[in-house]
Image: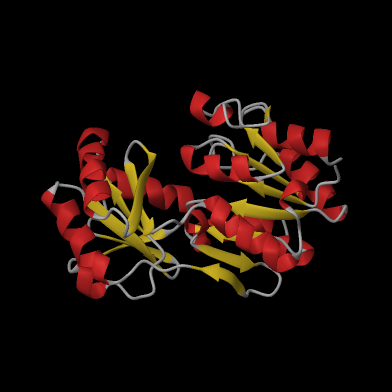
Amino acid sequence: MKYKMIVLDLDGTLTNEKKEITPRTFNALMMAQEKGVKIVLASGRPTQGIVPLAVQLNLSKFGGYILAFNGGLVIDCNSGKQIFNSDLAPEFINDLYAEAKSAGLEILTYQGDVIAATKKKNKYVLTEAFINKMDVVEYTDFPNQVKYPINKCLIVGDPKPLHALELHLAEKFDGKMTVYRSAGFFLECVPLGIEKSQSLDALISAIGIKRQEVIAVGDGYNDKSMIQYAGLGVAMANASTEVQDVADYITYSNEEDGVAHVVEKFIL
């Protein structure tokens, strides 16, 4: 099979523990693009948190794509045009804010090139800022200060109370909004049904690529759908057993150039 697209999760997949693309992985991906293969950077991160990696890989030159907010927004790096977009309904923001504060947790969203959070110096808010290399602005009146549209909110806090809130919100917003944890301390709140495979399907339909021609690589629970969807679904060695079980192939870890191995084996 000649693969025409490779879809890459970022944290724990494309980047190592330092949140960097290693030289071997970078070189392999540049060679793949020279052969005409399209790269899609697919992450729960906001757009601004993905752009630096897109620039590093020169996706605008080669016609790559950014799939941000776990699939809530898909952008053509060459034209800057939106291919797919799904916003979080404004009426949910008040409820999410009230539920987060009632549970003693913090909530944040993304406003342009900054993170808007209810507490600037919270350690989990700062973790999100570090991952995305974005500054944080504290909103003391979060529901009334945020500007729409919003693709997602993130509630952060210690794993135990966050898990309890996850169960509560999943029941409260059943059939209205999707909530899931992308890490023990991150609770993602996104439009109903938003996940990577749905947006990937919209993307390849728009540009005329078949799913059998797509490689998808990831390590997290939110990567399962795209791993199952792609013609070749790849899980990282550092992925959980649950993710590895749905993959067609298991590559090395993100500390061992697992993405480079996939590109070299199946594309180059």
In this rendering, position of residue 250 left or right of residue 112: right
Which residue is pictured at 23% across the width and 52% down the height?
A: 106
**Where does the image place residue 147, in percent across and percent down from the top left?**
33, 75
Q: Residue furthest left?
A: 102
In this rendering, position of residue 90 left or right of residue 45: left
Is residue 189 in view from this perspective? Answer: yes
Q: Is residue 48 above or below residue 263?
A: below
In this rendering, position of residue 102 left or right of residue 79: left
Which residue is pictured at 54% across the width and 52% down the height?
A: 196
Q: Quadrant of the C terminus?
A: top right
Which residue is pictured at 39% across the width and 74% down the height?
A: 149
Q: Quadrant of residue 66?
A: bottom right
**Where does the image place residue 242, in percent across and percent down from the top left?**
50, 28
| Residue closest to the eye, 220 or 176 | 176
| Residue closest to the eye, 260 or 163 | 163
Is residue 10 in view from this perspective? Answer: no
**Where does the image place residue 141, in percent across and percent down from the top left?**
18, 69
Figure colour scheme: secondary structure
In this rendering, position of residue 7 left or right of residue 31: left
| Residue closest to the eye, 135 or 8 | 8
**Where does the image place residue 57, in percent across and percent down from the top left?**
71, 54
Q: Quadrant of the N terminus?
A: top right
Which residue is pictured at 78% across the width and 39% down the height?
A: 263
Q: Is residue 243 above or below residue 81?
A: above
Q: How many marks?
A: 0
